[in-house]
Image (cartoon, rainbow, N blue to C red):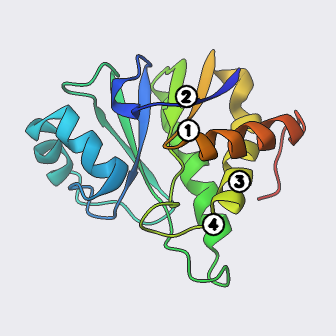
Amino acid sequence: MIRVLQADITTLKVDAIVNAANESLLGGGGVDGAIHRAAGPELREYCRGLGGCPIGEARITPGFKLSAQWIIHAVGPVWRGGEYQESKLLANCYRNSFALAVENEVKTIAFPSISTGAYAYPKDQAGKIAIAIMRDYENKFSEIIACCFSAADVKLYEEMLLSSPRQRGSRI
């Protein structure tokens, strides 16, 4: 089941939350900063040992002080007009996050809208990619949450979810 809600992702009681991380994995602004603050300084120390993460890939860490057992750090692309494989890289963020979740027997997972904050990816385009990939994996999880920052984002995601086909094998 895919669900859309407006919430602070750091407070969700799920097996894993996804962090819209930067390549250093050492924290930043927005969702990334909020997750690092809520998880505590142990997260930064653990991430320091990972040596970063390339764009389009993901890494998993313990949740430390969060309710979530795991944090999956996905590094999305900066929007540069769509001519630099941004859609492929963003889709890979979601796919690689789901692969780590499956590997670690996660049953409930929450995603922020990766790359739509400081990285300026257009929300409607990013949302279509997110929902398409979530549809590809929904039969492997008891719950997938699209965790939105604002009521406007919730409305956008709910509309996309209603209009997206339940099919496997997205072409993104």
Instruction: Check disc 4 and report the residue beneath it.
Output: 122
Q: Marks 4 and 1: which is nearer the front?
A: 4
Residue 4: image location, x then y, percent: 63, 30
Q: Residue at x 61, y 19 (%)?
A: 143
Badge 4 or badge 1: first in the primary sequence: 1
Q: CA distance from mark 4 to mark 1?
A: 25 Å
Badge 1 or badge 3: first in the primary sequence: 1
Instruction: Check disc 3 and report the residue beneath it.
Output: 129
Front residue of this view, candidates 148 and 98 = 148
Residue 89: image location, x then y, percent: 59, 65
Q: Residue at x 20, y 56 (%)?
A: 26
Residue 51 is labelled as none
Badge 2 or badge 3: first in the primary sequence: 2
Residue 48: image location, x then y, percent: 15, 53
Instruction: Check disc 2 and report the residue beneath it.
Output: 102
SS at mark 1? helix
Q: CA distance from mark 2 to mark 3?
A: 19 Å
Instruction: Check disc 1 and report the residue beneath it.
Output: 99
Q: Do labels 2 and 1 touch, CB within 8 Å? A: yes
Q: Marks 4 and 3: which is nearer the front?
A: 4
Quadrant of the snapshot with the N terminus = top right
Residue type, numbered disc 4: Pro
